[in-house]
Amino acid sequence: MKNASHPPETEAQERWTVDGIEDSPRGPLARLERGDGTTFDLPLRLLPEGLREGDLLAVQDGPDGVTVRILVAETLERHEASQAQLEALNNAESDVQDDDGEITV
């Protein structure tokens, strides 16, 4: 696999999410999730540098092999949306708590 700044427009892209990064006896692995929910592991050395948990990847098969790149803007949008959801849940939870910390259902 290789990194590319911009893949050719004619090839279809697949999106993977980095579900986790962990050490293994064979070296660091990235646990990846496809759009259909299936997961698999790849050696971290085959993926772009700076890869982090939660990153969204564009994966494209082309005539020169598979190209993988981190979708920085889309990853940031996902993080911001997740943070907004978490804050909304926390605010809703605080609305149902009494002053003494008990939850009213």
Image: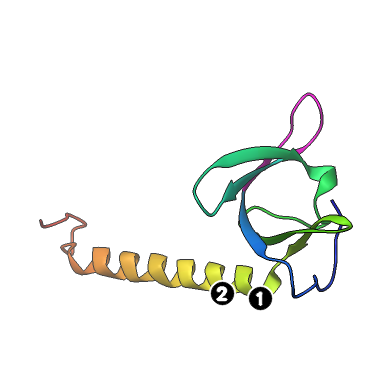
Residue 55 visible in rendering: no
- Residue at x-position 25% and y-position 63%: 93
- Residue at x-position 75% and y-position 55%: 51
Between 62 and 102, which is closer to the camera in this rendering?
A: 62
Amino acid identity at mark 1: Ala
Q: Is residue 81 above or below residue 55?
A: below
> In the rendering, which numbered label is found on residue 77?
2
The picture places residue 55, in percent across and down from the top left corner, at: 65, 59
Marks 1,2: beta carbons within 8 A:
yes
Q: Image check: 8 left or right of 94?
A: right
- Residue at x-position 84% and y-position 72%: 5
The reply to whether the magenta stretch includes residue 21 is yes
Q: Is residue 44 above or below residue 88?
A: above
Residue underneath mark 1? 73
What secondary structure is marked by label 1? helix
Q: Quadrant of the C terminus?
A: bottom left
Which of the 4 image quadrants contains residue 11?
bottom right
Judge the density around disc 1: few (<14), some (14-19), many (≥20) Cα neighbours within 10 Å. Answer: few
Which of the 4 image quadrants contains residue 31?
top right
Amino acid identity at mark 2: Glu
CA gap, disc 1 and disc 2: 6 Å
Q: Image check: 46 left or right of 41?
A: right
The picture places residue 91, in percent across and down from the top left corner, at: 30, 70
Q: Image check: 41 left or right of 85?
A: right
Which of the 4 image quadrants contains residue 26?
top right
The reply to whether the magenta stretch includes residue 27 is yes
Between 73 and 82, which is closer to the camera in this rendering?
A: 73
Q: Is residue 52 above or below residue 95?
A: above
Magenta residues span 19-29
Q: Which residue is most to the left?
A: 105
Residue 102 visible in rendering: yes
- Residue at x-position 53% and y-position 54%: 35
